[in-house]
Amino acid sequence: MPYTLNGCGTKYYGKRELLSDESYITTEWIVIAYVPLIPIGSFRVQPTGKSSYYIIGSSSEYLVRRVPFNWKQIRNTYLAVITIVSIISGGLWLMEQFSSSKTPKQTKLSPTASEICFYGKLAKICKNIEDS
């Protein structure tokens, strides 16, 4: 049976091919921080109705039978993890980009001597063209 301690261990994820007896196929995963990393196996589980509830969690009993890997469920779990990680990473990246801790670039307001000389010569050339 799956067991996690502080989000690390094994856990069931997914619920496919529900039957009238309330059984369904789920996949047991090795998890770290509740993130599924490696599938261990797929199982058909059926709740027995026996549950215990505690202040910080709950426990339920199931009849469990191993079945072949459910590849659609594994694929969908990986897609969900990739999507969630991408959204979180993108949000963190955006926060970094728009963070107020970054100092804005200084804009140059006063012209340099060479710019003054260039624009002065350009103005003279333009004036000579207008006069002719």
Image (cartoon, helix red, strand yellow):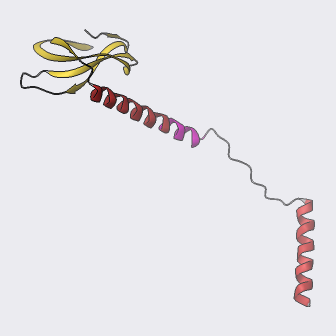
Give the magenta part as a residue range.
91-100
In the figure, 60 relative to 19: above or below? Answer: above
Tell me the residue at 13%/16% (across/down): 47
- 74 lies left or right of 127: left
In the figure, 108 relative to 45: above or below? Answer: below
Of residues 35 and 7, the one drawn nearer to the viewer in this rendering: 35
- 87 lies left or right of 80: right
x, y percentage for residue 109? 79, 58
x, y percentage for residue 36? 37, 21
Q: Residue furthest left?
A: 20
Q: Classify residue 33 by image quadrant.
A: top left
Q: Say whether residue 92 is magenta.
A: yes
Tell me the residue at 51%/35% (across/down): 92
Tell me the residue at 24%/18% (across/down): 68
Q: Say whether residue 98 is magenta.
A: yes
Tell me the residue at 88%/70% (across/down): 119
In the figure, 128 relative to 17: above or below? Answer: below
- 69 lies left or right of 8: left
x, y percentage for residue 1? 25, 8
